[in-house]
């Protein structure tokens, strides 16, 4: 076995190992419970890209413990199954609208001319844009970072499910409680 | 006799010419100025000119990519606009509101908000990469570099031009991820004081956290500054070079539960008041700074996420801009009331601004 083949084999092995470990370890994001769940009628989010704003409450883990109010939006990414009324949460996103860069509130942008400006003329799906420093987040990818000074994507809420026609939001990324 | 007639005729001609020149320029007596506000519309690479008498957006000037810094000398006939992505500084004639030229002399990574000596000779131009450049406006070249580390961002010039105060942002992971050349990942928590004649560092003022926008009293004795993690501002004694006090906003319990930042500060009412923004709570506060610690005297709901503040030349009007809602709001300082609002085009992102009392006619001044 020559040296090049040996190195390639090792690189492949490390890659497979990392992927396997990620599957075993599961979602690395840690969530913390909200003080009380946020309930939003499912019928309010049947239309894609029409966000419903809400305010959630949590407690920062720092000492002394601090009450934290978190602004968020719930929206449907696409029409999904049965026009979004089946009770599935698969196509719903609940995101904190505080920019992880410097705590400004981001805007949900659906206007085509604004989207073209942000993406340099490229047609795009709705985005979040920070009004302070222009960081851009992908609404279709659960608020993932696209560009700008933000060190990461938008903080995510966890949707527990749909109960009696209400979308139940119960948790927020733990790190958000210290940063928001 | 002939000579007498000649002298009389000469006198009449002189009188006529004097009368004529006065009659031609009744609205521009010597020393007349037109007060304007120049505001960067960052996402359109332009500077908007706002006439402050009518409070109207009267002209738009194309400058470099992402304008993010403005400075004007005491003569007020020039404006230097730094473009952070363009890496250039554009010179604007404020009398005619025309672009004169653009300097592209290696202003480093992302030139930010500089300040100029009152005589207009030296522009202290910060770079995001952690240093300031001293640009000689006569030689049109950078003659000195001053390293502060951190992120070069805000600059305050003493009214007499003796000292320049360099206010680097401490920064965090987001700033460090910016595509800037080899950013030094240091977080200076101090103001650097520079002798603006010798261009040498003469001291530092520790402030305990990252400096943010600052401003100075008309007599140069107090530096007021927003800093990281303080909803309010610090008061610095410039002679002692130390923090002597701090002002904090009074907030409701619900406001306290939402993290925010102070960003944008100005001295108003002939040095007796300081106005400062609370970004996330969409508020602007006014403080009486004749007492120690400063006392909050007013708070105003403004547009979305106020970011910068500037005053009129008589300091009786305060201008607050809100990049998130593309607004510029004017407040009457004495009445503590809003008196006007300009809506810029959606998404234009108004950011840095400067009021200039431009001479009404061309002046001979040093560059």
Image: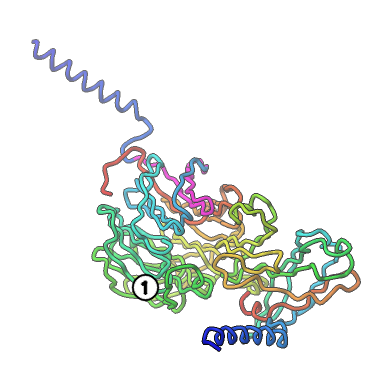
> Measured from the top left, where is residue B197 in percent x and y?
24, 63
> Measured from the top left, where is residue B356 in percent x and y?
40, 48
Relative to the observer, which residue lies in front, B89 or B237?
A: B89
Could you tell me which residue is drawn at 32 percent across and 58 percent down?
B123
Could you tell me which residue is drawn at 68 percent across and 79 percent down?
A67
In the displayed structure image, the side of residue A41 where residue A59 appears, left or right: left
Residue B357 lies in the magenta stretch: no
Relative to the observer, which residue lies in front, B229 or B289?
A: B229
Relative to the observer, which residue lies in front, B323 or A123?
A: A123
Q: Main secondary structure of the magenta part?
A: strand
Question: Which chain does the residue under circle 1 lie in?
Answer: B
Q: Secondary structure at mark 1?
A: loop
User: Which residue is the extreme one toward the right?
Assistant: A164
Q: Please count the marks in the image.
A: 1
Q: Which residue is mark 1?
A: B148
**Residue B283 in which image quadrant:** bottom right
Circle 1 packing at 10 Å, graded few (<14), some (14-19), many (20+), is many
**Above-or-below relation of B302 to B242:** above
**Above-or-below relation of B161 to A18:** above
């Amino acid at each position: 076995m020559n040296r090049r083949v040996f190195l390639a084999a090792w690189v492949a092995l490390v890659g497979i190992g990392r992927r396997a470990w990620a599957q075993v370890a599961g979602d690395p994001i840690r969530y913390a419970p909200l003080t009380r769940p946020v309930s939003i009628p499912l019928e309010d989010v049947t239309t894609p890209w029409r966000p419903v704003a809400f305010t959630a409450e949590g407690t920062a883990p720092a000492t002394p413990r601090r009450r934290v109010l978190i602004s968020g939006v719930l929206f449907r990414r696409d029409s999904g199954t049965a026009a979004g009324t089946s009770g599935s949460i698969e196509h719903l996103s609940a995101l904190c609208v505080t920019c992880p860069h410097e705590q400004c509130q981001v805007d949900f942008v659906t206007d085509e001319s604004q989207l073209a400006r942000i993406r340099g003329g490229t047609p795009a799906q709705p985005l979040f844009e920070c009004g302070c420093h222009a960081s851009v987040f992908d609404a279709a990818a659960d608020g993932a970072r696209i560009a700008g000074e933000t060190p990461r994507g938008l903080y995510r809420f966890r949707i527990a499910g749909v109960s009696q026609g209400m979308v139940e939001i119960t948790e927020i990324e733990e790190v958000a409680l210290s940063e928001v | 006799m002939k000579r007498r007639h000649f002298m009389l005729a000469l006198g009449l001609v002189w009188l006529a010419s004097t009368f004529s020149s006065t009659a031609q320029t009744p609205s521009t007596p010597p020393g007349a100025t037109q007060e304007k506000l120049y505001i960067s519309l960052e996402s359109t690479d332009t500077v908007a000119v706002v006439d402050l008498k009518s409070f109207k957006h009267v002209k738009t000037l194309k400058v470099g990519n992402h304008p993010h810094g403005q400075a004007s000398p005491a003569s007020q006939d020039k404006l230097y606009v730094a473009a952070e992505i363009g890496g250039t500084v554009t010179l604007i004639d404020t009398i005619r509101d025309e672009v004169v030229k653009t300097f592209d002399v290696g202003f480093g990574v992302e030139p930010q908000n500089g300040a100029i000596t009152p005589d207009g000779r030296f522009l202290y131009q910060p770079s995001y990469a952690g240093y300031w450049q001293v640009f000689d406006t006569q030689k049109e070249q950078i003659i000195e570099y001053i390293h502060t580390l951190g992120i070069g961002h805000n600059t305050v010039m003493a009214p007499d031009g003796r000292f320049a105060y360099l206010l680097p942002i401490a920064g965090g992971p987001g700033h460090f991820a910016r595509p800037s050349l080899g950013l030094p990942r240091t977080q200076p928590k101090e103001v650097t004081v520079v002798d603006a004649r010798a261009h040498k560092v003469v001291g530092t003022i520790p402030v305990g956290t990252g400096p943010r926008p600052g401003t100075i009293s008309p007599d140069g004795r107090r530096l007021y500054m927003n800093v990281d993690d303080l909803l309010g501002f610090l008061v610095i004694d410039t002679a002692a070079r130390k923090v002597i006090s701090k002002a904090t906003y009074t907030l409701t319990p619900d406001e306290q539960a939402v993290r925010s930042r102070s960003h944008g500060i100005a001295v108003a009412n002939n040095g007796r008041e300081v106005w400062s923004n609370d970004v996330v709570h969409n508020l602007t506060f006014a403080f009486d700074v004749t007492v120690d610690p400063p006392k909050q005297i007013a708070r105003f709901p403004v547009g979305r996420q106020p970011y910068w503040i500037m005053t009129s030349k008589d300091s009786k009007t305060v201008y607050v801009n809100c990049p998130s809602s593309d607004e510029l709001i004017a407040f009457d300082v004495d009445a503590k009331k809003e008196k006007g609002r300009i809506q810029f085009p959606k998404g234009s992102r108004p950011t840095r601004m400067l009021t200039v009392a431009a001479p009404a006619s061309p002046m001979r001044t040093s560059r």
